[in-house]
Image (tube, rainbow, N blue to C red):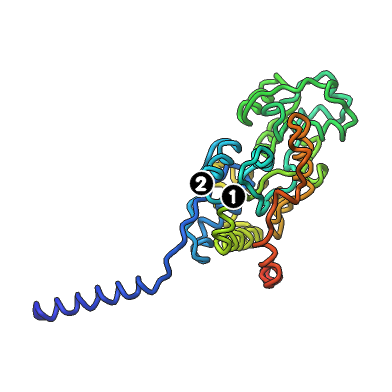
């Protein structure tokens, strides 16, 4: 091949590559944040790793932001477009006038378990004993309240200790400092192999509980309704595929959460199959509960109704268009 011909061929190749690139639609950048490494982030991680956002024209690389209140402020400040966040910090900000709106939900249950020494088989044996939670007012604290009620006990029948994260709580349990602890999978599976068992599972007992939502600002939603719609399409698809492909889902979740034992990852996967909703709608009943809790210390909350804090426009549009009907028809 002559030098001139080689130059022509190279030029044609570059032109073809440029033309192909020009034909590919540009992805819409969406800054997504989430506030914790837990099983509630399983579908979000799955959607990212399997390219579901990209398939829908979105450029999404979720960023971890420590603390629900911090993440809420990031949405209000405009540095995060869509957040996977707890209902409570977002609702509290909305009550104070922040531009926050719930657009979806990924966990509308309280997926915690009261795990106790194997020798304890009933509520009466817990009287006077110490139970660990993360901190007062947290989801673990609420779970402890529900569990005690289920066992016919009052809060002052036991000693509730705020010990911080699960690693600290589990260490305290294994060393014999406490009789039980409030955990969630995969930690529940791990501690259950060391002389402990689940005395009360709150996942279904607590009913419709506000655990983890999707939220954005009304300003962002108004300006980018189609982007929000495609985000929710990706999440719904991820939930469907996550449930359909257990081997792949467990593998991705184990790597994401750095779960050492594959058995723990499998147990967590199975526990959360009933937590993830088929359609990621926000929980109205859960938001009402949150507003009631906030009103105990902030009178402004009494003036709010749950319906004021949600906008299901994108989800409703997908429902009308038959997206969910078609998606669930090929579900697990």
Whether residue 144 is visible here, answered yes or no, is yes
**Which numbered tag is attached to residue 279?**
none
* Disc 2 packing (10 Å; few <14; some 14–19; many ≥20): some
Residue 89: image location, x then y, percent = 65, 38
Q: Earlier in the sequence, mark 2 or mark 1?
A: 2
Looking at the figure, which quarter contains the C terminus?
Answer: bottom right
Residue 276: image location, x then y, percent = 69, 53
Q: Is residue 227 left or right of residue 190?
A: left
Q: Is residue 175 above or below residue 98?
A: above
* Disc 1 packing (10 Å; few <14; some 14–19; many ≥20): many
Q: Is residue 70 above or below residue 221?
A: above
- Which residue corresponds to the image point at 83% horizontal and 18% vertical from the top-left? 128
Q: Is residue 6 left or right of residue 262?
A: left
Q: Is residue 320 above or below residue 275?
A: below
CA distance for labels 2 and 1: 8 Å
Residue 108: image location, x then y, percent = 73, 48
Q: Are marks 2 and 1 in contact (CB under 8 Å)?
A: yes
39 and 254: which one is in front?
39
- Which residue corresponds to the image point at 76% horizontal and 43% vertical from the top-left? 304
- Circle 2 is placed at which residue position? 78
Q: Is residue 46 left or right of residue 194?
A: left
Q: State the SS at label 1.
A: loop
Looking at the figure, which quarter contains the N terminus?
Answer: bottom left
109 and 260: which one is in front?
109
- Which residue corresponds to the image point at 76% horizontal and 28% vertical from the top-left? 117
- Circle 1 is placed at which residue position? 217
């Amino acid at each position: 091949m002559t030098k001139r011909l080689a130059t022509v061929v190279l030029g044609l190749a570059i032109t073809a590559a440029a033309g192909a690139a020009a034909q590919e639609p540009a992805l819409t950048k969406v800054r997504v944040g989430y506030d914790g490494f837990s099983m509630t982030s399983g579908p979000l991680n799955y959607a990212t790793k399997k390219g579901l956002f990209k398939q829908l024209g979105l450029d999404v690389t979720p960023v971890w932001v420590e603390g629900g209140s911090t993440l809420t402020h990031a949405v209000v400040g405009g540095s995060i477009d869509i957040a996977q966040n707890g209902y409570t910090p977002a609702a509290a900000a909305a009550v104070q006038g922040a531009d926050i709106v719930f657009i979806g939900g990924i966990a509308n249950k309280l997926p915690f378990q009261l795990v106790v020494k194997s020798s304890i088989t009933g509520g009466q044996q817990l009287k006077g004993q110490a139970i660990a939670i993360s901190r007062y007012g947290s989801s673990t604290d609420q779970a402890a309240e529900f569990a005690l009620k289920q066992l016919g006990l009052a809060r002052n029948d036991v000693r509730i200790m705020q010990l911080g994260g699960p690693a600290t709580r589990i260490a305290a349990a294994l060393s014999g400092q406490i009789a039980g602890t409030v955990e969630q999978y995969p930690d529940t599976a791990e501690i259950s192999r060391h002389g402990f068992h689940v005395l009360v599972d709150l996942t279904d007992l607590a009913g419709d509980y506000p655990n983890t939502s999707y939220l954005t600002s009304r300003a962002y939603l108004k300006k980018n309704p189609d982007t929000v719609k495609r985000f929710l399409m990706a999440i719904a698809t991820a939930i469907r595929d996550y449930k359909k492909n257990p081997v792949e889902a467990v593998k991705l979740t184990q790597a994401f959460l750095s779960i050492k034992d594959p058995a723990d990852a499998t147990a967590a996967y199975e526990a959360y199959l009933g937590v993830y909703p088929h359609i990621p709608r926000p929980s109205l009943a859960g938001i009402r509960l949150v507003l009631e809790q906030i009103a105990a210390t902030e009178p402004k909350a009494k003036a709010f109704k749950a319906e004021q804090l949600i906008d299901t426009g994108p989800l409703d549009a997908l429902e009308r268009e038959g997206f969910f009907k078609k998606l669930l028809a090929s579900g697990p």
